[in-house]
């Protein structure tokens, strides 16, 4: 944080735009994090502007690092709650990271299996060329058994 920003934070606090700029987190994201309870409630000015203490920047840096490791906002909320309750959440964090690693290994295995099936199917299609069907005979007569690529399950929010 710049010296000018530190001085401002120490005196009157930081407005949401200043926090966004200093942290690299958008204003709407800050409001969303506040609603989720990840930042706590900032105090308000007479004009109803949010005013944050400079500790919010440390909290945001923690959230960004936790997300980079693969933690969801719900998991980050649990970690923050444990810490706020006076408990060290490190054991919980290690266990969650271990589960994430196991899930990642499982998904990688599924992706390798799906890739093999898709490559085999594509070789068959290359041999067959065009094929009659209602829309595309290649797909309609396909023997590809993976109904849903694992990456699609990830986008639907079924990840750990």
Image: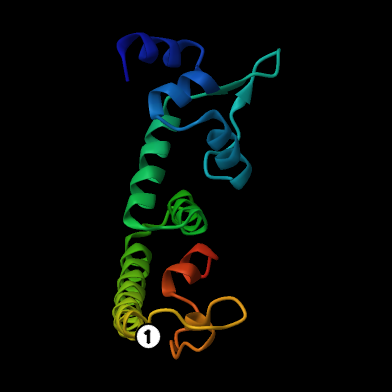
The x and y percentages for residue 118 are 35, 80
Residue at the disc numbered 1: 128
Residue 136 position, x and y percent, is: 53, 77
Q: Nearer the viewer, residue 24 or 94?
A: 24
Quarter of the image where the C terminus is located = bottom left
In this rendering, the answer to whether 107 lies above or below 59 is below
Position above or below: 73 against 30: below
Residue 15 in sight from this viewpoint: no
Residue 158 visible in the current orientation: yes
- Would you call the spot at circle 1 few (<14 residues within 10 Å), some (14-19), or many (20 or more)? few
Q: Residue at x 45, y 84 (%)?
A: 146
For residue 63, above or below residue 95: above
Which residue does the image show at 52% across and 20% down from the upper left?
17
In the picture, the quarter occupied by the N terminus is top left
Instruction: Find residue 119 and report its horizontal and vertical position in percent.
Output: 30, 80
Residue 91: x %, y % from top left: 33, 66
Q: For this view, does 38 lie left or right of residue 117?
A: right
């Amino acid at each position: 944080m710049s010296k000018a920003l530190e001085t401002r934070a120490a005196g009157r606090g930081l407005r949401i735009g200043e926090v966004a700029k200093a942290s690299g987190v958008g204003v709407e994201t800050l409001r969303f994090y506040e609603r989720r309870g990840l930042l706590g409630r900032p105090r308000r000015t007479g004009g109803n502007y949010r005013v944050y203490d400079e500790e919010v920047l440390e909290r945001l840096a923690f959230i960004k690092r936790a997300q980079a490791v693969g933690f969801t906002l719900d998991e980050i909320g649990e970690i923050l709650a444990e810490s706020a309750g006076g408990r060290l959440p490190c054991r919980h964090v290690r266990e969650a990271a271990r589960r994430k690693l196991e899930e990642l290994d499982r998904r990688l295995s599924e992706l390798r299996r799906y890739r093999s099936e898709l490559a085999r199917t594509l070789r068959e299609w290359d041999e067959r060329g065009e094929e009659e069907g209602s829309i595309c005979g290649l797909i309609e007569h396909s023997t590809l058994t993976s109904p849903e690529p694992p990456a699609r399950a990830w986008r639907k929010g079924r990840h750990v």
